[in-house]
């Protein structure tokens, strides 16, 4: 392993200093040649001084294959110069020509490798990370489209084997030059949501089959079916992954027909970076991993957020969707942020009008970097937090804010508060911190008492092929949907089943989101009964839940389902109406009929089967996040 890393390091060093090495070799060869020819003149018995002009001219001749044919008396160093000089010159010439025509040649040969390359438009933080992962972990070629004439990220990726196309991706000619119609995937990461949407529309026009020119238009019915089956199995379509991070634009277009478009040749998937990062954070650093309320006698779940960045807003939603435990109380959350965020907070609350029904949210308008000890005591004296998530605009501010607050905690002997710093990784700060912090794991018992701080690298853990392309965060959601497809629905539910009776890839976005939200709570349910998922060897039948556990998890599942419906805009009504967004079951567990309760119990009983479909099994490991006794904070004064 170390040898392989050393070889890669040496290869990278030679690649970065290629021209310097070639230039040095040419100078060395020329100098040795001049000295050698001068020595040959003396050895021939020439009288008087050496003619250095002849020595220089003779050396030049070596570089263009014009040296003498008979060199029996030449020393070894001259023989080496005679062989090496012309090849160095040829290498430099070919390399120079390749710099000008290499991109065109590489793009030309892509026509013989359809569906074996990807196109990435916009090489910023997101595009660079995804391109590098493809170059290092995939056999697919990578084509980069960037409008900046000199982008150092593009230059670095080209040295690793990427193909760069300079120009604006909004130009059809640029997209044609990048051969997007032959690509497997195209990623739109320009940093401008409007540009991403416009490029997606252009790409759709480029790959849309022309009337009368479909490849299978001349086939009979049997041939067309075979061709369609081949295309489906080969995934012959182009999949367009489009980044839309603006909450307003995302809300406006997520239900638009184009963004659920699925055709024979083209499909679109919206990728919201903050949403994916928030789901990833709550998978690795969920609040109940630090503290789990098991009954109404324990203190409730209470979470602190520092800052009100778009990522914090997504984490608040994720908290509202997943923080449901046996105490059956809605979670609490406090946000400490600057006064400048008031307008954003109002927009956020208008976007989720039913948010108050699923989470008790409060705000403290204060700069997290300048919180004084007395202010922190006042906050902590009334509400003990299970965990604090910090995501400020700049990574250095997040690190300083958390460390200052943690120092107040330690100096004044306040009960330990766990911190999760969500690093944006926009600067070199994350790379420096990466050398000292402990890897994020689900075992929170190893965190230091003096500095219980975890650093979550948002881009490294989320901007990956597994998350964006392979939907690794949705593995459980896929299984839930497959189980739904195989279930039998009596009576009127058959129509509802038909509306969702399609493969996961073809599922409408809002139905896919419902499965995602149910899947995100699976690990929480397992932790409630003291279990954790692990890879199964052969024994799938050893995990059995008691009736009491099923009943507890059914109540929790009903509360989670209500939170999902409330955040989607539903209200309680006498009849189920998908158009008016009303549902009769949006009421407490005690008010449900026994038949409706049994539906939730049945969903819980399916957990072992879902795990089996994933090739996993639940193992009992004791309760996670034992509740700590409430501690009365004694303020001793600022230190």
Image (cartoon, rainbow, N blue to C red):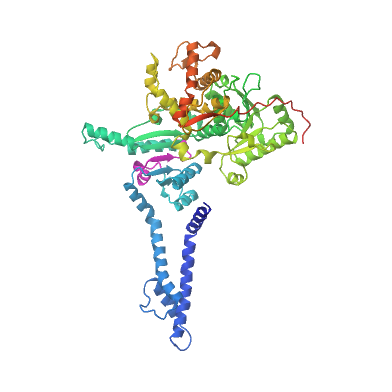
The residue most toward the bottom is 47
Find residue 64 and report its horizontal and vertical position in percent. Answer: 38, 71
Quadrant of the rendered structure where residue 79 is? bottom left
Rendered residue at 39%/17% (across/down): 489
Quadrant of the rendered structure where residue 200 is? top left
Is residue 253 among the parts visible in the rendering?
no
Q: Is residue 64 left or right of residue 581?
A: left
Find residue 507 and report its horizontal and vertical position in percent. Answer: 40, 27
Find residue 533 and report its horizontal and vertical position in percent. Answer: 52, 31
Find residue 436 and report its horizontal and vertical position in percent. Answer: 62, 45
Quadrant of the rendered structure where residue 102 is? bottom left
Above or below — where is 500 with respect to 366?
Answer: above
Q: Is residue 228 left or right of residue 621?
A: left
Quadrant where the C terminus is found in the figure: top right
Q: Is residue 191 magenta?
A: yes
Magenta highlight range: 169-194
């Amino acid at each position: 392993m170390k040898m392989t890393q050393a070889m890669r390091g040496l290869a990278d060093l030679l690649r970065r200093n290629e021209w310097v090495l070639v230039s040095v070799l040419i100078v060395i060869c020329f100098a040795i040649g001049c000295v050698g020819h001068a020595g040959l003149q003396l050895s021939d018995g020439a009288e008087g001084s050496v003619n250095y002009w002849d020595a220089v001219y003779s050396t030049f001749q070596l570089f263009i294959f014009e040296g003498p044919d008979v060199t029996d008396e030449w020393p070894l160093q001259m023989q080496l110069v005679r062989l090496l000089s012309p090849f160095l010159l040829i290498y430099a010439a070919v390399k120079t020509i390749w710099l000008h025509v290499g991109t065109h040649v590489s793009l030309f040969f892509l026509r013989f490798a359809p569906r074996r390359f990807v196109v990435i438009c916009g090489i910023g933080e997101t595009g660079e990370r995804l391109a590098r992962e493809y170059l290092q972990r995939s056999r697919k070629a990578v084509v980069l489209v960037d409008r900046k004439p000199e982008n150092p990220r593009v230059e670095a990726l080209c040295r690793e084997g990427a193909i760069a196309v300079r120009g604006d991706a909004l130009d059809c000619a640029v997209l044609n030059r990048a051969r997007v119609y032959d690509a497997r995937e195209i990623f739109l990461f320009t940093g401008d949501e409007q540009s991403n949407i416009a490029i997606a529309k252009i790409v759709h026009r480029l790959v849309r089959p022309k009337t009368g020119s479909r490849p299978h238009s001349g086939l009979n019915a049997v041939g067309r079916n075979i061709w369609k089956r081949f295309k489906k199995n080969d995934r012959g379509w182009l999949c367009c992954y489009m980044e839309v991070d603006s909450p307003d634009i995302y809300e406006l277009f997520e239900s638009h027909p184009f963004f659920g478009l699925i055709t024979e040749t083209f499909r679109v998937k919206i990728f919201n970076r903050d949403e994916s990062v928030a789901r990833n954070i709550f998978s690795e650093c969920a609040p109940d991993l630090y503290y789990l309320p098991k009954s109404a006698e324990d203190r409730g779940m209470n979470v602190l957020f520092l800052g009100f960045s778009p990522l914090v807003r997504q984490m608040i939603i994720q908290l509202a969707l997943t923080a449901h435990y046996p105490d059956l109380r809605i979670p609490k959350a406090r946000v400490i942020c600057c006064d400048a965020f008031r307008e954003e907070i109002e927009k956020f609350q208008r976007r989720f009008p039913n948010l108050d029904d699923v989470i008790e949210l409060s705000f403290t308008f204060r700069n997290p970097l300048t919180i004084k000890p007395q202010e922190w005591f006042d906050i902590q004296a009334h509400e003990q937090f299970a965990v604090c998530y910090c995501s400020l605009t700049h990574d250095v501010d997040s690190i300083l804010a958390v460390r200052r607050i943690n120092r107040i905690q330690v100096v004044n002997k306040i009960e330990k508060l766990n911190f999760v710093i969500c690093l944006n990784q926009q600067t070199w700060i994350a790379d420096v911190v990466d050398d000292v912090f402990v890897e994020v794991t689900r075992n929170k018992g190893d965190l230091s008492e003096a500095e219980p701080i975890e650093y979550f690298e948002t881009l490294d853990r989320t901007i990956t092929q597994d998350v964006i392309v392979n939907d690794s965060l949705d593995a459980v959601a896929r299984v839930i949907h497959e189980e739904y497809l195989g279930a039998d629905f009596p009576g009127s539910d058959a129509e509802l089943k038909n509306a969702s009776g399609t493969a996961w890839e073809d599922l409408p976005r809002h139905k896919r989101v419902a499965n995602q939200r149910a899947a995100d709570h699976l690990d929480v349910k397992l932790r409630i009964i003291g279990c954790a998922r692990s890879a199964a060897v052969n024994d799938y039948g050893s995990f059995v839940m008691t009736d009491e556990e099923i009943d507890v998890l059914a109540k929790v599942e009903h509360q989670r389902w209500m939170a999902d419906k409330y955040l989607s805009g539903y209200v309680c009504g006498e009849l189920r109406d998908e158009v008016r967004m009303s549902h009769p079951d949006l009421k407490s567990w005690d008010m449900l009929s026994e038949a409706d309760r049994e539906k939730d119990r049945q969903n819980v009983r399916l957990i072992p089967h879902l795990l089996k479909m994933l090739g996993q099994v639940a193992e009992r490991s004791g309760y996670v996040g034992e509740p700590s006794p409430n501690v009365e904070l004694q303020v001793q004064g600022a230190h």
